[in-house]
Amino acid sequence: MLGTILKRKLSDNQVANIFINAIFDTVDNGFKEVAQLINEDVAFVNSPAINVNDHGEFGLIVIVGNLSYLESTFDAEQAGRVEKIIFEKLSKIYNIQEVEFTKMIREYQNFITKVNHPSKNMIYGMSKAVFYKYNLNEYQDEYFRRMQAPNPLFLKRMDEVMSNFVWNWDAFFKKYKLN
C-alpha cells in the first residue's frame, strides 16, 4: 500500500533516459556472457569466436526488441512521444542524424519481422536476428547449414538468454508512475 502511494512520477523524458540507460547497462554488462554462450554452444561444429567487444549488432537488436514492448505497454500517443525522445537521444549517442537513426531502427524492425515470420514472438525474433546478424549459419552442422536455418535447440537456448534483455515493465510500474 505504502509503495503505491510513494511512487515517483516520471516525465516522458525521464522514462526515455531510464530506458536507454538500462538497455546500455545490460548490453554492456551482459554481452560478454552472451558471446561466451554462443561461442561454446554445442549446436556449432566450430566456435563462431564472437569477440566480447562486438556488441553493436546485439545492442541494436535489444533496442528494437524493447521498443516493440514499449509500443504494447503505453497508449499509442505516449509511446510515440517516448519513442521520439529515445530516437533523439540515441541518434546523439550513435553520432548520426535522427532521421538516419530512425531509418536504421526501422530496417532492424523489418529484418526481425522478416526472419521471425510467421511468429509474432519478439524474443524468438531477437534470437533469430542474433543468429543472422552474427552469421552463425556457417558454424552449424551440415544439415542446418544447407537449410540456412538456425538449429532449433540453439534458438531455444538463445530465447532464454534474450529474455534477460527485455525490459520488465511490470517492475517499472510498481516503482514509478507517469505524468
Image (cartoon, helix red, strand yellow):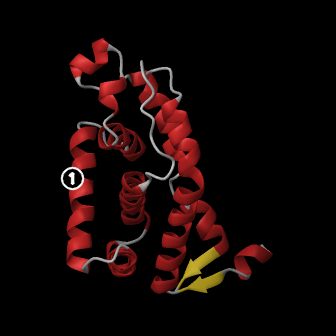
Q: Residue at x 59, y 69 (%)?
A: 173
Viewer-proximal residue, 72 or 27?
A: 27
Mark 1 residue element:
helix
Quadrant location of the N terminus? bottom right
Residue 49 in the figure: left or right of residue 147:
right
Up/down of 60 relative to 32, above or below: below
Toward the right, the furthest residue is 2
Question: Residue 17: x and y, percent?
Answer: 51, 78
Q: Residue at x 34, y 42 (%)?
A: 125
Toward the top, the furthest residue is 143
Residue 80 in the figure: left or right of residue 4:
left
Up/down of 34 relative to 140, above or below: below
Residue 162 in the figure: left or right of residue 78:
right
Q: Residue at x 21, y 43 (%)?
A: 114
Residue 164 seen anywhere in this rendered image of the structure: no
Up/down of 9 relative to 70, above or below: below
Up/down of 11 relative to 102, above or below: below
Question: Residue 62: x and y, percent?
Answer: 42, 55
Viewer-proximal residue, 130 or 122?
A: 130
Question: Residue 105: x and y, percent?
Answer: 27, 63
Q: Residue at x 38, y 45 (%)?
A: 126
Amino acid marked by disc 1: Asn
Q: Quadrant of residue 87?
A: bottom left
Reading the image, the residue beneath label 1 is 110
Question: Residue 40: x and y, percent?
Answer: 53, 28
Residue 45 seen anywhere in this rendered image of the structure: yes
Q: Residues within 10 Å of mark 1 (few under 14, many from 20)?
A: few
